[in-house]
Amino acid sequence: MRRKLIAGNWKMNGMTADGLKLAETLAQRAQQAADYGDPPPPACDLLVCPPFTLLWPVRDAIVGSGIALGGQDCHTAPSGAHTGDVSAPMLADIGCSFVVLGHSERRQNHGEDDATVRAKAEAALAGGLTPIVCVGETEAERDAGQTLAVIARQVEGSLPVEALSAADAGLVLAYEPVWAIGTGRTATPAQVQEVHAALRGQLAELLGPARAEATQLLYGGSVKPDNAPDLLALADVDGALVGGASLKADDFWAIAGACAP
Ligand SMILES: O=C(CO)COP(=O)(O)O
């Protein structure tokens, strides 16, 4: 049985005061749920991925709460002359256990291709982090009937298959249709399940059936408290990668609460 993961991708949002307040609110709720069972603890793991500037204060705010910390990107190298970049070991050093890689905003805004994403995922694994590798089609690709082919190509190119096999390490795969990100347009449950089932099948080919079964597949793209129950009930959806709604403690908590125990 795969445990669900609800991950908040804060993107480039939050001054120190906002980020701290959000993290403290979530930590208090998690602590209260764990200590008193009221409200009951969500039946999922929780992860927040703040911008780099907030990693340190958020780490301190969530310590001991059970909420995990993640970065939103990392470099392919562990250290060196790479102005403006942050490495996987640096993220691990500050308390991160995950890193989001290959988000469509990085693919679009920073020209990251599949080979780059794969190299970053290898670096993440080597640095002791669990990569959350993102894939997803554009609206034009979906309209042209290319969704499954595009995603299969991205997975083939982006997944660090050898490193995963060698390290016996895990990774999380996130399906985020580009047209559903920040638009309020969510993929329908049927669209999501179709892609996630295809992803599970491809993972079985690449990593073997046991690891495919164990890998968490997240859906991302306008996940909100009202659509979360239907999406999280799908057979091959093991959690959500939440953007906008993760910036509101009530919404993020409600999405986590939609995970069936
Ligand atoms: O990109 C996303 C998460 O990584 C999704 O963002 P929204 O939830 O704002 O659509």
Image: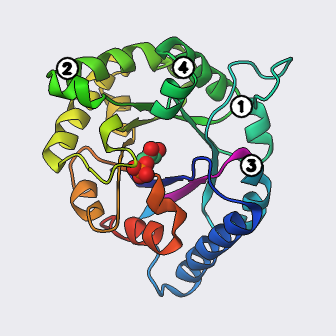
The secondary element bearing badge 1 is classed as helix
The secondary element bearing badge 2 is classed as loop
Residue 34 in picture, x, y percent from top left: 55, 77
State the residue position of label 2: 146
- Seen in the image, is 134 located left or right of residue 93? left
Examine the structure image and report whether residue 4 is included in the region drawn in magenta: no
* Mark nearer the N terminus (4 vs 1): 1
Label 2, label 1: how far apart the Cα atoms are: 33 Å
Q: In which quarter of the image is residue 17?
A: bottom right
Label 4, label 2: how far apart the Cα atoms are: 20 Å
The secondary element bearing badge 3 is classed as loop
Examine the structure image and report whether residue 48 is included in the region drawn in magenta: yes
**Eye-nearest disc, 4 or 1:** 4
Label 3, label 4: how far apart the Cα atoms are: 25 Å
* Residue type pointed to by label 4: Glu
* Residue type pointed to by label 3: Gly
Residue labelled 1 has its Cβ within 8 Å of some atom of ligand 1: no
* Residue type pointed to by label 2: Gln
**Identity of the residue furthest to the right in this view:** 81
State the residue position of label 4: 112
Q: Quadrant of residue 89?
A: top right
The mark total stands at 4
Mark number displayed over residue 95: 3
Residue shown at the point (74%, 18%) measured from the top left: 77
Magenta highlight range? 45-52
